Amino acid sequence: MTVAEQLMARGRLKAKQEGLRKQLAQKFSAISEADERRIKETQDPDKLDRALSLILKSESIEEILLPLYI
């Protein structure tokens, strides 16, 4: 992977993390520091995608963030 590709992948990862944080804050008003940290520590874009796909269907933050723990 070239340096440019690595930078682009890192940017996509950060965008997914930020998108998940913003959507959770909109849906639930506040996010705990532990949940914020978990999102930030997640480096697998597929796990972030799975969590993002649960935003509309789920009723709790725990349910949405479950893919980040598996």
Image (cartoon, rainbow, N blue to C red):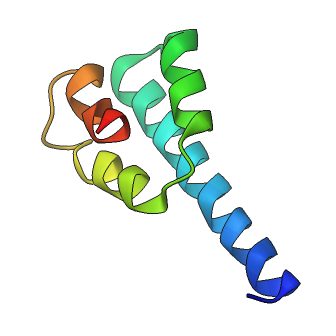
Q: Position of residue 30 (x, y in %)?
A: 48, 13
Q: Position of residue 24 (x, y in %)?
A: 41, 30
**In the image, is 6 to the left or to the right of 15?**
right
Which one is in front, 62 or 1?
A: 1
**37 above or below 20?**
above
**Number of marks present in the image shown:** 0
> Which image quadrant is residue 2 in?
bottom right
Residue shown at 39%/61% (left/top)? 46
Q: Quadrant of the C terminus?
A: top left
Q: Position of residue 15 (x, y in %)?
A: 62, 57
**In the image, is 55 to the left or to the right of 29?**
left
Residue shown at 26%/21% (left/top)? 62
**55 above or below 36?**
below
Residue shown at 52%/13% (left/top)? 34
Q: Position of residue 65 (x, y in %)?
A: 32, 32
Q: Quadrant of the N terminus?
A: bottom right
